[in-house]
Image (spheres, rainbow, N blue to C red):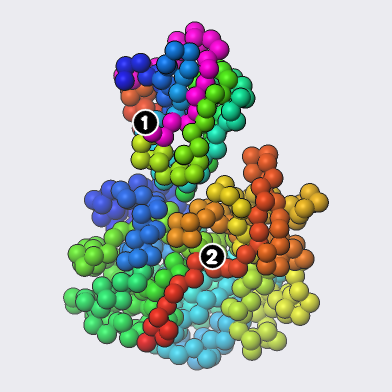
Amino acid sequence: MSDVKYSKEHEWLKLDGDVATIGITKHATEMLGDIVFAELPEKGSSVEKDSTAGVVESTKAASDVYTPISGEVVDANQAIVEDPSKINADPEGEAWFFKLKIKDIKELDTLMNKDEYDKFAKESSQ
Amino acid sequence: MTKKTSLYNLHKKYGAKLVEFAGYEMPIQYKDGIIQEHKFTRSKCGIFDVSHMGQLFIYGKENLTKDLENIFPTDLKKLNINQSKYSFLMDENAGIYDDLIITKILEGYLIILNAACKDNDFKIIKTKLGNTYNLQLKEDLSLIALQGPEAKTILEKKVKGVSKLKFMNGEKYKFLDINIFISRSGYTGEDGFEISIDNNYVEKFVEEMLNEGAKMIGLGARDTLRMEAGLCLYGNDIDKNTTPIEANLKWAISKNRIDTEYPGSKIIKKQIQSGVEKIRVGIKPVNRVIARGNTRVFNKDDKEIGKITSGTFGPSVDHSIAMGYVENEYSKLNTKLFLEIRGKKIPANICDLPFYKKKYVKGEINV
């Protein structure tokens, strides 16, 4: 999992060639509680780094999902729209949110590695 | 500084996530999470710490009933000892200061108040009653709700005879060497009990219920349970800008009090006779999207016709559910409307309250 990057908005990103798979972190799901609704960006649309690309709602509140990098949406995981509880069950695996064809690989430099993120998550939840 | 209930340490022991609610540090959920806690209450038995709510005792004899009828729209004369009624504290415009449960007790009356309203309620009631009566907002008592289909059998094991209580009736019982007051009531749409017990004994009492198979349930699931049951939350669904008639709670105004006087009585009578402009309804969005409080409601011609006051995902009805106020002409069952959520107009339908109907064995609740 060393090739996984993390954002301050609690998204993870895994790069495979020029396609990035993006989801929300386990820490994010623990803060949100039971997720009951997910909305994803449309396939073919373009998203800009740090802009809203989706929504998750828990029984408690709604939260925006931001894209940590810019690109074109090449796939969106409809399985989590149909059964949002999958996000709590396996947020950093099966329950990915969307895939982007990335625009600028340099944008990845602004993201954190796992150790940095774990530290950040621990500090931000205190 | 936030206050703690007597169960604070027990909440921590069972892994509660604590949040500030009405000035108290309260459990929003425990380890299982809101959905599991909700379903456990519907299928077995949940315990809720509601000790933040006010327990107002008013001591007095015959005249007290008459004097309280000048404050509340409830026929208190008809209440038997230990019988409870849902009622309201209102201003002169029939705006709701609080919704509450009044129980007639041997020594006078016990009124259960919302945590966020209790101090203001106390002032209002005290001012209206004058110095004739002794009023006590008890801080030495905790309040516990035991809710769900197994509540009856679990509680009966420790409190003999309690399963004979009828809905909205209570009784004094013994737990160890102390008196406790139990009524058959709740806020979940399930059969259940509410137990008023000395702060020094509440932890012991709850541990015994947990040993018998009940589980701790947080305020998160309490909210989803009450929404499925179509029940109002003060501050969301009712407040000083809504009347009981607009809130579709006319049933809680005693019939023989409609022509008598209490704060707001003129407005209540007028609204019963000539109707209201807005009314509280149940609303279901067509998809899983959640309509939170303050979501704007539109008709098919894009005219704004109302506002959502509560909304969530209902775990037992497996659907997004909401309630709110719409202009009266749009309140008919199955009327199609639109909810503005994150800039999009989501289709929705007016539907019956409650969303979740308990399949009681006939007569079971009134044994």
**Which label belongs to residue A4?**
none
The residue that disc 2 covers is: B355
Q: Is residue B109 magenta?
A: no
Kind of residue sitting beneath label 2: Phe
From the viewer's perspective, tell me whether residue B122 is left or right of residue B211: right
Q: Is residue B230 left or right of residue A93?
A: right
Distance from label 2 to label 1 (Cα)?
Answer: 35 Å
Residue at x 42%, y 56% (from the top left corner): B221
Answer above or below: position of B206 versus A44: below
Which of the two residues, B362 or A110, is positioned nearer the viewer here? B362
Q: Secondary structure at mark 2?
A: loop
Callout 1 secondary element: loop
Query: Is A107 contained in the magenta span?
Result: yes
Q: Nearer the viewer, residue A6 or B164?
A: A6
Residue B359 falls in image quadrant: bottom left
Say which residue label 1 marks.
Answer: A93
Instruction: Name the subunit of mark 2.
Output: B
Vertical placement of residue B44 versus B77, above or below: above
